[in-house]
Image (cartoon, rainbow, N blue to C red):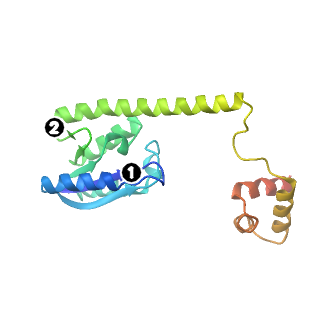
């Protein structure tokens, strides 16, 4: 059986090594031929296919029928959105490709496995909603304590340096690099100059 392994970690400080090692071990026990391993580093499962390059390559491989099975560590590695997860499952099923989820011991080549995957997707989306709610509550608490959130305000000194650098004929990106600030900050100063 030809298999594509997918692994994802949400932050750059995390490593997908454990996910890949376990899946390769399963593949050796089940005589899989691992065609390719796809890894997205530092990308949330809430992001869509267009923002997850390895996931996009995996799905292009599914379209080409490069593999018979997609193997992932857990359902939440694939997606934290039920809609996205169902689209993914529909896409792989439409191509005759199965799904193996290690943590859930799930194989979607069976009807019971497909039903279980849908239930797990609901819980993954619920977990994401809880995380978002905790973040919002933390931000509200910080605001109520008078803490300033977001980037610090632009100083007059920084705005002056940006204006001078732009006046020398430099573009937005070069100005941001020379001054040591974000492109958006330079764009704001430039827009204010044009108004």
In the displayed structure image, the side of residue 191 where residue 41 appears, left or right: left
Q: Is residue 69 above or below residue 175?
A: above
Depth check: give the residue in front, 6 or 90: 6
In which quarter of the view is residue 37 placed? bottom left
Badge 2 density bin: few <14, some 14–19, many ≥20, Cα 10 Å: few
Quarter containing the N terminus: bottom left
In which quarter of the view is residue 34 placed? bottom left
Depth check: give the residue in front, 64 or 185: 185
Q: SS at mark 2?
A: loop
Q: Is residue 185 above or below residue 45?
A: below
Measuring 16% from the left and 37% from the top, which residue is drawn there? 110
In the displayed structure image, the side of residue 147 where residue 110 appears, left or right: left
Depth check: give the residue in front, 159 or 17: 17
Measuring 29% from the left and 32% from the top, which residue is drawn there? 118
Residue pointed to by mark 2: 110
In the displayed structure image, the side of residue 55 where residue 154 appears, left or right: right
Residue 160 at x, y = what percent?
87, 60
In this view, the mark in front (2 or 1): 1
In the displayed structure image, the side of residue 155 where residue 126 appears, left or right: left
Q: Is residue 110 above or below residue 7?
A: above
Q: Is residue 38 above or below residue 130?
A: below
Residue 68 at x, y = what percent?
19, 53
Residue 55 at x, y = what percent?
38, 53
Residue 184 at x, y = what percent?
71, 54
Would residue 63 be visible to someone looking at this image?
Answer: no
Tell me the CA gap for discs 2 and 1.
25 Å
Would residue 60 be visible to someone looking at this image?
Answer: yes
Tag 2 and tag 1, C-beta contact below 8 Å: no
Residue pointed to by mark 1: 8
Q: SS at mark 1?
A: strand
């Amino acid at each position: 059986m030809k298999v594509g392994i997918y692994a994802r970690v949400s932050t750059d400080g995390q490593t997908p090594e454990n996910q890949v090692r376990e899946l390769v071990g399963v593949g050796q026990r089940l005589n899989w031929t691992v065609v390719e391993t796809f890894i997205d580093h530092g990308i949330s499962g809430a992001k869509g296919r267009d923002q997850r390059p390895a996931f996009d390559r995996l799905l292009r491989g599914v379209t080409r029928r490069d593999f018979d099975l997609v193997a992932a560590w857990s359902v939440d590695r694939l997606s934290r959105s039920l809609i996205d997860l169902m689209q993914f499952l529909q896409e792989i099923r439409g191509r005759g490709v199965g799904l193996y989820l290690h943590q859930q011991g799930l194989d979607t080549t069976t009807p019971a496995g497909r039903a279980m995957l849908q239930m797990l997707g609901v819980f993954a989306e619920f977990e994401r909603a809880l995380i978002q709610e905790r973040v919002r509550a933390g931000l509200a608490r910080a605001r109520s304590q008078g803490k300033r959130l977001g980037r610090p305000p632009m100083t007059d000194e920084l705005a002056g340096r940006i204006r001078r650098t732009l006046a020398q004929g430099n573009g937005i990106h070069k100005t941001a690099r020379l001054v040591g600030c974000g492109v958006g900050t330079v764009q704001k100063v430039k827009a204010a100059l044009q108004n």
